[in-house]
Amino acid sequence: MTPSTGDNAKDHDAWCRLVERLEALGERRLVLVEGHRDSALAWLQNLLPALHQSPGIWTGPHEDNPAQGLIPVPPAKARDWLGRELAVVVWDGWQGNPPDGLAAITGTLKAGGVLFWLMPPLARWGEFADPDYRRTGLDGAEVHPFVRRMAVILGNDPAVIRIDAREPGRTTLPALQAPNAPFTVATTPDQQRLIDQVIHFGQGRRRRPLVVTADRGRGKSAALGIAAAGLLQQGRERILVTAPGRESVETLFRHARQTLEGELAVEEGNGLVTRTGAELHFLPVQEMLDRRPAAEVVLVDEAASIPPNVLEEILLGWPRVAFCSTVHGYEGAGRGFAIRFRSVLDRKTPHWQSATLTRPVRWAVGDPLEALASNLFLLSASGMSAEDARITPKAIRIDQWWPAQAPESELIEAFGLLVDAHYRTTPADLRQWLDDPAAVTWCAWHEGHVVGVLWAAVEGGLSEELAPKVSRGQRRVRGHLLAQSLASHSGFPEAATQKTLRVVRVAVAGPARRSGVGKRLVTAARAWVAAQQLDSLGTSFGGSPELLAFWQSCGLNVVRVGFHREITSGEYPLQMLTGSSSQGVELADRLRGRLARHWLTLVPRHWTGMPGDMLAAISDDLPATHVLTLDDRRDLDNFAHGHRGFDLCLPVLRDLGQVPGVMNWLRTRPELALWVGAVLQGRSWSELQVAGLCRGQRDGEDRLRAVVRELLENGPEM
């Protein structure tokens, strides 16, 4: 039955009053529109024009847009709207629900904002074939605990407004109490403290970077914009702003513009110039690094989305750099960014400073939508901190654990460890962990608390017909990251037919680190691999010397190194393996042997940007089988004690690293970085000089001659 015009007007009035009251309270709401999609769209087409909410977005097909003013945005692009403010979002869940995008979009809604989510009835969510499952290989799963968990949370949240698409008029909207004073977006005390701190930092001494972390909606970008304007007013001539995208700094520039007001002489898309010639300018990250323009201050927004090696380059490239990031969840864990980047700051700029914001600015304290998003996606999950407890290693036990069946308190602790330990653990990882039928997990327990977690997944087992096609690059199979990579990149189809347990993540709580918990978790996984008669245990990660050493201590060896840095970590991907079955042992040996044979050819072509200690550690891990000939020894002696040129001896010097024991010995020498750069990577003497590794060719050759002399006299038996 079609509602009458009078019913429509009454319904519109009720919704308009609700939005007005939400705005006055500084709150936002989720409206779950359940049931037939066509009915839901028809209701929204009738309602939305009356709400006059702008700006807004629509995540469904263009032709189904329920309101003229909504901007069409594919669900996969929702994260691109971080840093902007919206009044309404219509999320078409029938087209897919990528958790990262859905979590991110909740952070864009301002006070009074409404998120309309079109979905099947809650009772049917467990059987809903979300189109986004295909992207991650979850479409083959028989059950989806992640979405069932969401359905329970939504069904139990009294702040969620549930609409039956068949009879939307039957829903009674919440009667909200009017506030004593309407909510306004105003500078909070801790926001003002941050503004003052940024101005002080921008006027202060060089090499004292500032790291700013805050939850979404705390006014971080606004504070940076006001502070940047203040610095220009107080004499700074050029401030650069960079971020993963121009859109994410819109708020920063808007507040800088408002603060400068009549002092502006030029306003253009990427910059503001005052009448005195002072400039606030945006540059994309890579363009800024390529051009290296002079600036007294650099502000890096959404820093958790930028690889750490790039952040380090920015850190060392300008005198005063502020890094700003969201603490929880949308674009990756800002807390993981802070933890991981802290080691770089401690080494390079030990006088770095930190700041944070706690009170929301764009909505009120206790906003229901923020709390709901945090519960749905565990955005605030955190593991045990170093201050929480003292750990007795002998009291720790290791058990297999099933996250989809665990109590919420355990899930929060375990996922919090992953968030704290890994640079970019996002809501999508939570869904993959809960829903992947191939996932296997172990937890370390201490006095009822999770102090360690290992998440792994069974891969491989592809058919004899499919594996060669994967190896030739003719077919790709969703999932099976390690098995597929070793089959296609290393060229071994049996890597796809054999079954491997790939460790996805290992995380240990601060108080339990350095006590062998991580190694014990891996040992439990190795025992399970043997018991299940799988072929291998493996892992794939952004390589670092510390992680390589950990996995070596667990009995794994390098079988492949990626040619390109990972976007997320900024490090070269490293894949390690240990065989369990006889076939698995044989495959690991063949992979290692082939990589070792190709190593000296590949290093100068693909890994000249790899840090020397990392390259040396991998070289040391590979099988060393080269035997020096009498001619090789004569060349080395002539290089060490005579004047035989470096280039004439370079082939022998390169082979020297593959003589048993030599690379391990070289790793103890102070000239290791020079050796790696000149001998393995083939970098020019001018490059090595710029890098501070030598004063020029003569100095570099003399120091390498000294290394070879010492090696011949006091090195390992060759």
Image: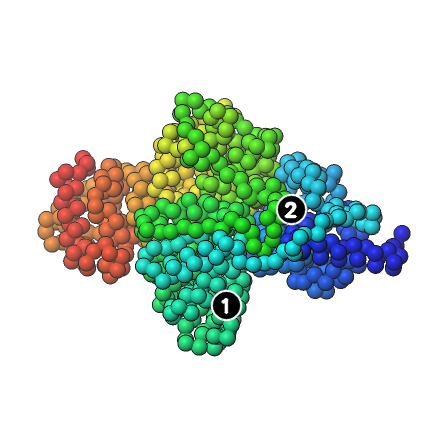
Which residue lies at the image location 32% right of the left edge and 59% below the top edge? 205
Q: Name the residue under label 1.
A: 259
* Residue farthest toward the left in the current orientation of the protein: 642
Q: Which residue is drawn at 71% across and 57% down?
A: 20
Relative placement, left or right, of 367 versus 575 is: right
Residue at 45% x, 55% y: name it. 193
**Can you tell which of label 1 and label 2 is closer to the viewer?**
1
Q: Nearer the viewer, residue 40 or 433?
A: 40
Question: In which quarter of the view is residue 553 placed?
Answer: top left
Question: Which amino acid type is shown beneath numbered disc 1?
Answer: Thr
Residue 617: % across, % down? 31, 42
Instruction: Specify whether 403 is left or right of 52.
Output: left
Q: Name the residue under label 2.
A: 368
Q: Nearer the viewer, residue 11 or 706?
A: 11
x, y percentage for residue 406?
Answer: 59, 30
Q: How far apart are marks 1 and 2 (CA)?
A: 32 Å
Tell me the SS state at disc 2.
Answer: helix
* Residue occupying the point 49% across, 36% down: 383
